[in-house]
Image (spheres, grey):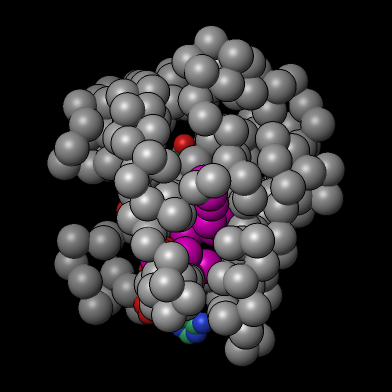
Amino acid sequence: MAKLVVIEGLDGAGKRTLADALTVEFDKSGASSTRIAFPRYGQDVHADLVRDAMYLRLGDLVKSVHGMAVLFALDRRAAIEQIEQGLAEYDVVLLDRYIASNAAYGAARLHEDGRGEFVSWVHELEVGRFGLPVPDAQLLLRVPVEVAAQRAARREDADATRARDSYESDDGLQARCAQVYDQLAADGWLAPWHVVDGVATSDFSTLATSLLA
Ligand SMILES: Nc1ncnc2c1ncn2[C@@H]1O[C@H](COP(=O)(O)OP(=O)(O)O)[C@@H](O)[C@H]1O
Ligand SMILES: Cc1cn([C@H]2C[C@H](O)[C@@H](COP(=O)(O)OP(=O)(O)O)O2)c(=O)[nH]c1=O
């Protein structure tokens, strides 16, 4: 059975870098894998609207936590076929951000915790109403908030296309988001979580093997 594996974490935590490392390990184990990163900027109209709102080009839309979350969720809804096709053709579909990103960032914006109303609303919307596939595993790539901010800033300097958006440049939001993520992982929200230390050198080979089991 193919596995749907999600990587979650703060902006700049190193999710893309972890996805690269896991792809190499899956390959070494003879497992085929494919990747999708959300939001699917440039591929889905809802994701492009998210980006416009984030860079303050859509008036007061960005102020609406629920409005933004609906756009993120619609991008994923439009990807259901792509995810299902990936699960039919590959051993692993690796997602860089998924439903828990909406739960964590939205709850953090509303100053709620991981057991609050917003997190339940996201579950109801994305799983209950939109029927998005539930992951087999969620990886929380955990790094101190300051480390994530430094990495995001360094990446911004190195890559002009990755200038920080209005969520990424809000340090208070990132700190609250880290707390919500910890709670979601501790509660096993939506699916089982594995916490990966993003600062220590991790054994990606063992991690990949456990994800394939
Ligand atoms: N384990 C690590 N140690 C040091 N720097 C890292 C590590 N992982 C990622 N980085 C660097 O941090 C920046 C952000 O990483 P990236 O994978 O793009 O994060 P994300 O996808 O979570 O936003 C990049 O410049 C990347 O090279
Ligand atoms: C996918 C997703 C992202 N987000 C947030 C997390 C990030 O702060 C922001 C943008 O996503 P991000 O992965 O940082 O995109 P990029 O690095 O390519 O700019 O959106 C949500 O609030 N809900 C979601 O469903």
Q: Residue at x 47, y 59 (%)?
A: 11
Q: Which residues are magenta?
A: 3-16
Eyeballing the image, is 129 above or below 136?
above
Q: Residue at x 32, y 74 (%)?
A: 155
Total marks in image: 0
Q: Residue at x 18, y 61 (%)?
A: 161
* Image location (x, y in percent) of residue 59: 28, 23
Figure quadrant of residue 40: top left
Figure quadrant of residue 83: top left
- Residue 10, magenta (yes or no): yes
Q: Nearer the viewer, residue 39 or 93?
A: 93
* Image location (x, y in percent) of residue 145: 62, 67
Q: Residue at x 23, y 42 (%)?
A: 41
Eyeballing the image, is 120 above or below 109?
above
The residue at the far bottom in this view is 201
Q: Is residue 153 left or right of residue 130?
A: left
Figure quadrant of residue 9: bottom right
- Residue 156, magenta (yes or no): no
Q: Quarter containing ligand 1?
A: bottom left
Q: Nearer the viewer, residue 117 or 6?
A: 6
* Image location (x, y in percent) of residue 153: 38, 72
* Image location (x, y in percent) of residue 132: 49, 25
- Whether residue 12 appears in this view of the structure is no
- Whether residue 80 appears in this view of the structure is yes
- For the C terminus, which image quadrant? bottom right
Q: Is residue 49 left or right of residue 187?
A: left
